[in-house]
Image: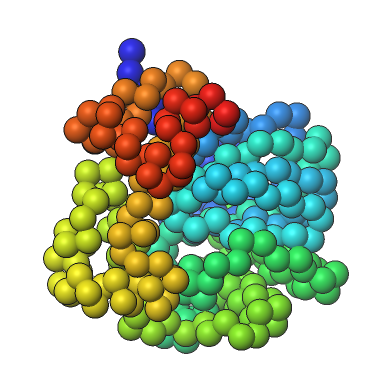
Amino acid sequence: MQPSTIKHHSTKDIIDFFGDLPQESEGLHVYIAKNEFNEIPVSYPFRTDNQTFMLILKGEVHIQLNLIHYVLGPNEMVVVKPHTVMHILKMSTDLKLVGICFSNEFILKNNFKKTDYDAFNFFTASNIPKLKLSKEERVATLAIAKLLAKNNQTTENPLPFRKEIIRNGFTTLMYQLAAIFRTEHPNIEAEFSRQEDLTLRFLAILNLNFKKERTVQFYADELAVTTGHLSKVLKDVSGKTASQLIEDSVIMEARLLLNNSSMTIAQVADELQFSDQSFFGKYFKKQTGFSPSKYKNIA
């Protein structure tokens, strides 16, 4: 049987794994841990399309985001961007956390203002995976999250103005988190430019196509720009050219798949749609300095 690749989970899947109930607003879920964890809810690497903020209230969790290992303790928050490969490696038995998960559809259907988008996009544009909140910031963030969660619970007798409370509570929470980011990193520009918008659109297309499309020309055509312009913009915004970002996506996926002991190198090459194992091996070694077999042995 062909081994499975990196699994993709919906918000509903994650809710089920954590033993929580569905909430009122489609595309938004606020999870506030009430019980300690006896085991890791999802023990393998997975992806989700949604944006997630995770604030640790008590205990410690070890997670891997796109192969980078992070340890989160009390009052520390991590941002998990869409399509990030997340792997929960270890949880302390006393772990308690707040998780806020929302989709692009939730943002779009609530008709947020441009100033709201600028604040929300700040999280996607910035490359800050982890923040330490002060005691006051934790108290304020938790209070807003609890208000939002209470009104987002499914019930037969909803409060008046429930949708307005959810929408404005979410907006307040996002501005609270944006303020924390901007205070700790004042030199990072929050508002999106045209270059940043092009970069995000490129990354969205890349996430869907990197296994079969590895030429800059394909992505330039999809975005209706020249290859030179695309690479210049990406270099200015991310520090890497289009070809480097494409290679990074392919190699990151290759490493994750090679870490899967049940997959052969030939199966990994096939999954990534290389013409044969030999071509994949040369490509992987050129980018990493290791042959796939050597990497698989030391991974």
Q: Is residue 13 visible?
A: no
Where is residue 276? Give x, y as percent.
23, 29
Q: Residue at x 52, y 82 (%)?
A: 190
Image-quadrant location for residue 140? bottom right
* Quadrant into which the C terminus falls: top right
Q: Is residue 128 above or below residue 39?
A: below
Q: Is residue 127 visible?
A: yes
Where is residue 70? Give x, y as percent.
68, 50
Q: Residue at x 70, y 82 (%)?
A: 183
Q: Is residue 241 above or below residue 271?
A: below
Between 133 and 199, the one lying in front of the other is 199
Left or right: where 22 falls relative to 136? left
Between 12 and 91, the one lying in front of the other is 91
Q: Residue at x 39, y 63 (%)?
A: 104
Q: Is residue 168 above or below residue 37?
A: below
Between 207 and 293, the one lying in front of the other is 293
Which scheme is used to colour this image of the protein? Answer: rainbow
